[in-house]
Image (tube, rainbow, N blue to C red):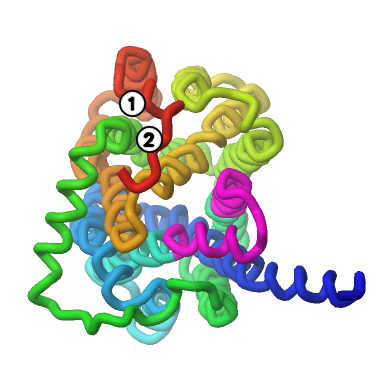
Amino acid sequence: MSTRDADLKQSGRLVPFVALEVSTLASGLGNGVVMVAFPWLALEITGSATAAGVMSAITTLPMLVSLIFSGVGVDMFGRRRVAIAADAISLASVALVPIVGYFFGLSFGILVLLSVLGAVVDPAGITAREAMLPEAARTANMTLDRVNGIHEAIWSAAYLVGAGVGGFALGIWGGETALWIPAGMFVVAMTSMVLVQVPGSGRPEAKPRLATVWPATKEGLHFLWGNRVLRAIAVLGAVTVGFWLPIEGIVLPTYFQMIDAPEKLGITVVALGLGGVAGTLAFVAFGSRFRRRPMYVGSLLISTAAVLGMALLPPFPILVALCVIAGFAYGPIGPLVNTEMQERAPDNMRGRVVGLIVATDHIGGPLTYFIIGPLIQNLGVDSAFLLMACAVFAVAVSSIFVKSLKQMDEPQVGT
């Protein structure tokens, strides 16, 4: 085989992975814009931080149901098909906001319904893409750690840069018009996914049967709970993300709306995203030199300490610097968790395990979303921010004492 033929062959092997990451990039950008646009619209319509928090909580509750069963759907209907369907429904949910607003006027109730429609399918799309990574890595002749690092870097950049773009778009066009940006991104995500032709991405051989959904879900839950490492990661992730989501989704938008600075919200979220990308890429380059448990615990401690500094609401340049530090330190968490899931879960159960881990990452959201609005109303945004930051830092400190995390340095495939 000539050098040119070899290059062409390798280029062809890279197509599925590149297409998968283009789809991830586009979907993440779209979801990032949605993350800031929907709470902002809720604040505009109602003028109440409590209402924005309630909307986020109402949106999260059905999403939790979807999270639990999304992995089963991926295993039953096929990874590529589920990813495309999820982006199609997300496209409908965001495009209907400006359409309804233009023709009928947008109410808080309609906004909540459309928010639920989009959020309920997001977990399936995330799970489907992550479930295809091991095969994409083998097709591209890349290591699993490297593929996970690249994937998480792209997702982090897309999601958080998308939120930054959303912040700027809110200031220029307003909430309804800004949602045409994610609509376009979801179209790109769907079309790119068609090119992801890797083993295991198509329709499973066995026909899906609804009667098997709950037994299959229980099987995944049993496996997850029985694996001490995955169980510890799931619990720590649930509590950490549960305290962080209201900070990102409610506290920061409320603070910057109070000072009438949507562009600063955009800069803040972009700083988090750029820090996260840099941290994840640093993991790609140097992560193999370090043991997993110290890297995981250290990432949690440093990132949450930076969030604690952010909660003091220092001058804006310092706040931005702390955002970069928090994002950079947290960067290795995503690829580390992905690799643990992929190494420990059997192939036929991978979708369920990934879906359940993603589910636990959001399980604390409804409770904290319900309480964050009253906290802001009664204590003020600064005190509410500090309280949530102290809680997330305490979770990080607790990870030092979780003995089962020591097994992260002893991966066992499919156990």
Seen at 57% across and 67% down, the residue is 20
**Amino acid at circle 1:** Met
**Amino acid at circle 2:** Trp
> Which residue is under mark 1?
388
Callout 2 secondary element: helix
**Toward the viewer: 365 or 214?**
214
In percent of width and height, residue 73 lies at: 27, 70
Segment colored magenta = 129-155
> Is residue 172 in sight in this rendering?
yes
Seen at 76% across and 69% down, the residue is 10
Kindly indicate whether the residue at mark 1 contacts the one at mark 2 (C-beta within 8 angstroms).
yes
- Determine whether 57 is above or below 118 in the image: above
> Which residue is under mark 2?
244
Residue 148 colored in magenta in the image? yes
Between disc 2 and disc 1, whose residue precedes? 2
Q: Residue furthest bottom?
A: 103
Seen at 22% across and 67% down, the residue is 109
Image quadrant in which the C terminus is located: top left
Left or right of 278 in this view: 237: left
**Toward the viewer: 349 or 104?**
349
- Determine whether 43 is above or below 268 in the image: below
Seen at 68% across and 70% down, the residue is 13
Left or right of 105 in this view: 336: right
In percent of width and height, residue 322 lies at: 59, 25
